[in-house]
Amino acid sequence: MLETIKIDAELICKRINNCEDLDEKIEALNYIREALHNISPFKSEPVDLVKWVKNDTVGANDYNPNSVAPPEMELLRLSIASDGYTQPIVTWNNSSIHAHEVIDGFHRHRVGKECSEIQSRIHGYLPIVAVAEDREGHNDRVASTIRHNRARGKHKVEAMSDIVFDLKKRNWSDKKIAKELGMDQDEVLRLSQLTGLMEAFSNVEFTEAWEVQQDD
């Protein structure tokens, strides 16, 4: 059986390699990868299926609280330029905005689009994996982005508090938020309070310094 499979695999490789059109070749490779993924014992794992898609079909989300300083961004560019893409961009399929919306890997996606040398090397494509369909709800996507960021220790407190506040408005309990975002409930409470205070004073104008009354 294995020998027959090897012969068939070699034949498929030859046929794909004979494709003169680059886009057609990449489409064929993606098709084969997906066909293998569908029968894989690891098909529940997103990393089991990495596809190459055109970079203009991949776009940012509007809630990512992660930020990278210019030196770190340059290091990321250098890493991808030197070592290639060692991690795919995590996405979900969102036909209403982008074909593939970034859940994790926003800065990897930027490098592939904005660095001309890398963009040329990967033919204007980007490597992606997609989260499972049952995790494609808005709250699930937000939670997934936060978990990826917190696992690396990179997130902005202000943006995190906004996200916690938004999830609470969507009727998520403190317990569920804590579980899905990898927090304890005290942290959820602190972030909720921060947002509440910011909203409470959003229309208040402050002077640059306190005015001290002088006694006569």
Image: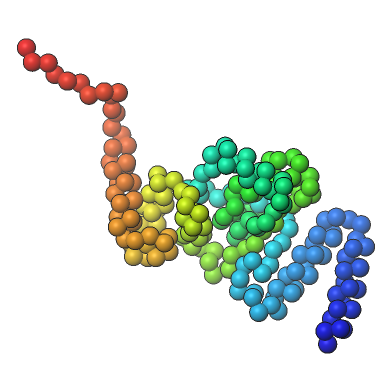
Q: Residue 216 at x, y = what percent? A: 6, 12
Confirm whether residue 142 shows in the render. no
- The residue lying at 38 percent from left, 60 percent from top is 183
On screen, residue 197 versus residue 160, left or right, reads left
Q: How many marks do you count on the picture?
A: 0
- The residue lying at 28 percent from left, 43 percent from top is 197
Q: Residue 49 at x, y = what percent? A: 68, 67
Res 51 quadrant in image: bottom right
Front-most of residues 72 and 214: 72
Q: Residue 185 at x, y = what percent? A: 31, 60
On screen, residue 51 versus residue 4, left or right, reads left
On screen, residue 125 versus residue 215, left or right, reads right
Q: How is the image coloured?
A: rainbow
13 is higher (above) or lower (below) than 181: below
Confirm whether residue 27 shows in the render. yes
Q: Residue furthest left?
A: 216
- The residue lying at 60 percent from left, 74 percent from top is 44
On screen, residue 9 versus residue 112, left or right, reads right
Q: Residue furthest top?
A: 216
Q: Residue 73 at x, y = what percent? A: 60, 41
* Quadrant location, the N terminus: bottom right
33 is higher (above) or lower (below) than 2: above
- The residue lying at 66 percent from left, 79 percent from top is 41
